[in-house]
Amino acid sequence: MTSIIQFADIHFGVEDQEAMGCVKACIEKLEPDIIVICGDITQNGSDAEFKSAHDWIKTLNGPKLITPGNHDTPMYGLIERFTRPFAKYKKWIEPLSVPHFTNSDVTILPYNSSRGWLFGFDWSLGAVNLKDMAKLTDEVKRLSQGGVEMIMAHHPLIYPEMSPLQKLTKNGPETLKYLSHRNVDVVLTGHVHVPFAIERQPNETEVISIGAGTLSTRRRDKPASFNHISVDQKMIKVSAIDFTDGKFLTTETFSKRVDALNSRRPLKPSNERDVGYDKLS
């Protein structure tokens, strides 16, 4: 069995200090094989916030797989946001991340859905370059040992209904459909500050979308939380770990047999299988 801790939206600078004081001891009991951090590590993208995040991440045992969020670009440095949006992230955080994680249970690769700016679009909502996603998916397939295949990003490809934030990630729905065609099993994200695990049905196959909550004070009617995901050859299980009354407690659970994942069922030969692939942009 592979144990995965999924963090998102820690927002150093406005982190929940009480929860952060307890989280390390909690995750050590869960004995993670890999810790994934799905962006928005800082609040304003400042050096001080990145240093605090760097120092905290270094205290966590084992490998980490990290991708940035929109708050990890300079909030107030507009010129830097246009010209070098991820310079501080690359200095402080990127060296702490492994490029991927793979074993017989699971394969996980990161994708940067965040942007310093978007022409004619709210830069904070993120975007997917579909050609890059096609290359990343090829890499997932190359590395996979037959286990559950996951891609992690900051922005949800489609916002879940339970999210109070309802926006549009540029190329998000098209990406989800593409991943469905390629039989990718899971997308791990953050951004909306509420935990969720739901099955998507964009076309012939299903993709499970798993979102982590936040460990910051910027909560949306939910307590501070993170996810624990366990995966083996038979089952994938997702537990939301909420910080309530001074301690972390498991409050919500989603589980699915791996052999029941519709992403695993053979697709009928069809010209529609590659619809969109030759139009990636």
Image (cartoon, rainbow, N blue to C red):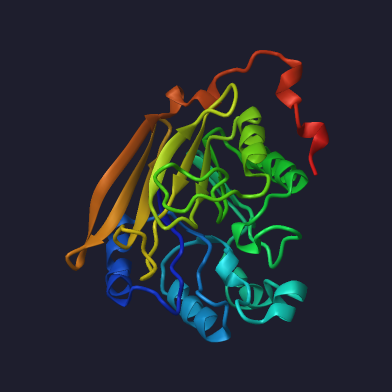
Q: Residue at x 43, y 68 (%)?
A: 10
Name the residue furthest front. 120
| Viewer-proximal residue among 30 and 150 | 150
- x, y (%) of residue 274? 75, 26
Depicted 35 relative to depicted 44: above or below: above
Q: Position of residue 156 (x, y in %)?
A: 54, 48
Q: Is residue 265 left or right of residue 260?
A: right
Q: In the rendered image, which quarter is residue 266 located in? A: top right
Residue found at the very far right of the displayed protein: 278
* Left/right of residue 75 with respect to residue 31 in the rendered view: right
> Residue 273: x percent and y percent?
71, 22
On the image, which quarter does residue 143 sit in?
top right
Q: Is residue 2 in sight in this rendering?
A: no
- The number of numbered discs placed on residues in the rendered structure image is 0
| Residue drawn at x 38%, y 31% as measured from the top left | 256
- Quadrant (top left/top right/bottom left/bottom right) for the N terminus: top left
Q: Is residue 279 above or below residue 261?
A: below
User: Is 143 situated left or right of 118 in this image?
Assistant: left
Q: Can you give x and y, in whole percent of width and height, for residue 212 in the image?
A: 42, 53
| Above-or-below relation of 48 to 37 | below
Residue found 70% across the figure and 78% down from its top: 78
- From this viewpoint, is residue 3 visible? yes
Check the picture and name the quadrant holding the C terminus: top right
Seen in the picture, residue 26 relative to 109 is either above or below; the reply is below
Most extreme residue toward the left is 245
